[in-house]
Image: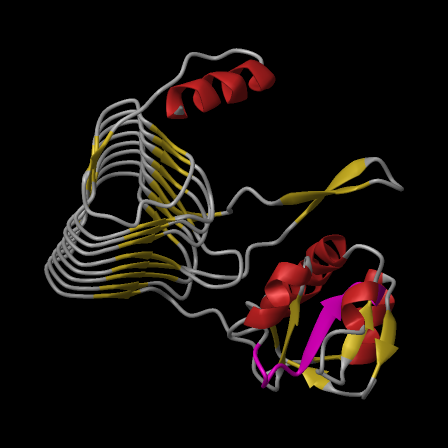
Amino acid sequence: MPTLSLRDIASSIEGEVKGNIDLSIRHLSEVHKCNSEQICFIKDEGFISKLSEDAGAVILSPKIAKKVKIENQIIVDDPYLGYARASKLFFDLSQSFEKTEPEIGKNFISGENVSIGHNCEIGKNVKIHDNVSIYPNTKIGDDVEIHSGSVIGSDGFGFVKDKNLDKWIKIYQLGSTIIENDVEIGANCTIDRGALGNTHIANGVKLDNQIHVAHNVIIGKNTVIAAQTAIAGSVKIGNNCQIAGHVSIVGHIEICDGVIILAKSFVTKSLLKPAVYSGVLKVQEHTKTLKLIAKLNR
């Protein structure tokens, strides 16, 4: 498997190496899962406590570098921009891996104009309707049905602003999409693959039409979600939840098991108690919204 040296990575992302410049790195990883053959990044001090002790190397700022014990470092002014640039390196590296034909199980039914990328695994008794696109490296379990027009494993929405160049730099998505057994996905849904880890849809999940599931989202078993719900990146949704139509969920929050969210709700924080939730505010200037929320809470 091809690798990149710490020196090569640092040169490409305009960083300064500390430690073993010849260290071979195989992959760009999440901060808490990084092993001795991988590199990760720390965006801000809140992630220091999550850093794996086994990390091979880490991309970070000069300020954070002083607080991290990992010896092999690439120091940059903007670690998030450094991560974006590194993602392109590892994406290009992945293109040199062997590409295999999809593995498809028994009793597979396919409609017209279905596209299935390389290195995909599809289980038995799977039915895919017309005009579905399944991107490379997607895994689909048994007894799954995907309705027309859905896209599985597309790029997550990831960009970072390079202020010096005054342009947006793409963050290449290096993870995959895993869909377990007995899942049904409605028409015109979009499920993005993970940025570093995986997007994961567990057993028994049912998705209505026109649902967006962003990168690194985890949806627990037997959860059902109605039409036009949008789930931002890195949300973790528990088991046996019910999410009604047109719900908006911000990124990087957790919803525990057994939660019910009513239609048109706007979820802005973690829901850690099983209950029925609702809530929507009209659009207005943000400062006015904050004042209104404060009054309602009082």
What is the span of residues highlighted in magenta in the rendered image?
A: 52-62
Q: Is residue 40 visible?
A: yes
The N terminus: image quadrant: bottom right
Based on the picture, tell me whether residue 61 belongs to the magenta stretch: yes
**Residue at x 44% of width, y 38% of height:** 250
The C terminus: image quadrant: top left
Q: Is residue 127 visible?
A: no
Left or right of 255 on screen, residue 30? right
Residue 125 image-quadrant placement? bottom left
**Residue at x 67% of width, y 64% of height:** 42
| Residue 138 placement (x, y as % from top left) | 37, 59
Q: Is residue 266 above or below residue 195?
A: above
**Residue at x 59% of width, y 84% of height:** 53
**Residue at x 59% of width, y 45% of height:** 158
| Residue 81 placement (x, y as % from top left) | 75, 53
Q: Is residue 20 above or below residue 198?
A: below
| Residue 290 placement (x, y as % from top left) | 52, 22
Based on the picture, tell me whether residue 113 belongs to the magenta stretch: no
